[in-house]
């Protein structure tokens, strides 16, 4: 079983709609969860971090965490063409000194 | 703030040669830096954790004698790919943890180094 799983897509969403990205993880001891955006040929950039169950909102982005279901999601409201990218879900088992385990990413396409 | 740089941004080398990649935290001190590798259409894979002043911790399956890591200061970590072969061609990305923000665990990523071994 892969440690962090994401649907690779592509996920196509009309401009202005809500994009919903999902991620599941296998290790129950995981403590920290992150969503990164990666454009082709570039390194990842952090969008959201979430550490406790529930929702966390930042602008057009909302991260949701359900540790019981081992599930993390990212909602992007009012999707823009510039949101088209690969979205990587990352999980950390322990504290800040631990590295991240990434999923393969979901390729999101926002259609104008 | 929290800017991480890498040098070079891309490098082409012949098989059998060694290549050094630098990762610098420009505006903060980083006791811990991480090295990742990303093959085409794959996700980032953690290679090793680099701690200032001590030996790096390598992930399972990563050859420590092939991928030499040195973290000599709080702002610089280097990755040397020794005796590179075409299968080492990849996108190498470092990240750094901000010491001053020790209460958080955000990693700031460098722009990456694309290595091509001929």
Image (tube, coloured by chain):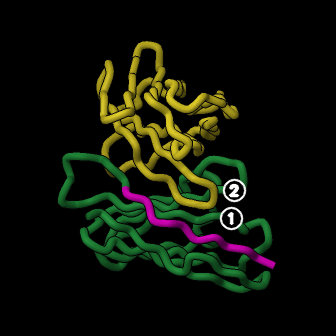
* Secondary structure beneath label 1: strand
Q: In this structure image, what is the colour of chain A?
A: yellow
Q: Chain of mark 1?
A: B
Q: Is residue B111 above or below residue A84?
A: below
Q: Is residue A6 above or below residue A43?
A: above
Q: Which chain is green?
A: B
Q: Residue at x 62, y 47 (%)?
A: B43
Given residues B28 and B70, the one toward you in this image is: B28
| In-image side of A35 versus A23 (left or right) | left
Residue B116 within the segment the image draws in magenta: yes
Residue A85 visible to the viewer: yes
* Secondary structure beneath label 2: loop
Q: Which sits earlier in the primary sequence, circle 2 or circle 1? A: 2
Q: Residues within 10 Å of mark 1 (few under 14, many from 20)?
A: some
Q: Residue at x 47, y 64 (%)?
A: B94
Residue ID for mark 1: B90
Given residues A60 and A5, the one toward you in this image is: A60
Q: Which span of residues is magenta-colored?
A: B108-118
Residue B14 within the segment the image draws in magenta: no
- Labels 2 and 1 positioned on one and the same chain: yes
Q: How many marks?
A: 2
Q: Chain of mark 2?
A: B
Residue ID for mark 2: B39
Q: Is residue B29 above or below residue B60?
A: below
Residue A26 visible to the viewer: no
Given residues B47 and A108, the one toward you in this image is: A108
Q: Tell me whether circle 2 and circle 1 mark residues in contact (CB < 8 Å).
A: yes
Q: Residue at x 71, y 81 (%)?
A: B12
Q: Where, quadrant-wise, is the C terminus of chain A in this rendering?
A: top right
Q: Position of residue A82 (x, y in %)?
A: 52, 46
| In-image side of B27 versus B50 (left or right) | left
Q: Residues within 10 Å of mark 2 (few under 14, many from 20)?
A: some
């Amino acid at each position: 079983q892969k440690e962090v799983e994401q649907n690779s897509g592509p996920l196509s969403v009309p401009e202005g709609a809500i994009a919903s990205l999902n991620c599941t993880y296998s290790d129950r001891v995981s403590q920290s969860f992150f969503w990164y955006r990666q454009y082709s040929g570039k390194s990842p950039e952090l969008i959201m971090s979430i550490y406790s169950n529930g929702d966390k909102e930042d602008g057009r982005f909302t991260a949701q965490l359900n540790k019981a279901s081992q599930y993390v999601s990212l909602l992007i409201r009012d999707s823009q063409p510039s949101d088209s990218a690969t979205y990587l879900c990352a999980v950390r088992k322990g504290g800040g000194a631990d590295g991240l385990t990434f999923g393969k990413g979901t390729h999101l396409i926002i259609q104008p | 703030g929290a800017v991480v740089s890498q040098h070079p941004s891309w490098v082409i080398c012949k098989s059998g040669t060694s290549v050094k990649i630098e990762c610098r935290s420009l505006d903060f001190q980083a006791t811990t830096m991480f090295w990742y590798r990303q093959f085409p259409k794959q996700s980032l894979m953690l290679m090793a954790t680099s701690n200032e002043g001590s030996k790096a911790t390598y992930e399972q399956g990563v050859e420590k004698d092939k991928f030499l890591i040195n973290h000599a200061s709080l702002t610089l970590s280097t990755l040397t790919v020794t005796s590179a072969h075409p299968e080492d061609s990849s996108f190498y990305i470092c990240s750094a943890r901000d010491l001053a923000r020790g209460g958080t665990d955000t990693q700031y990523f460098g722009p990456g180094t694309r290595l091509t071994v001929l």
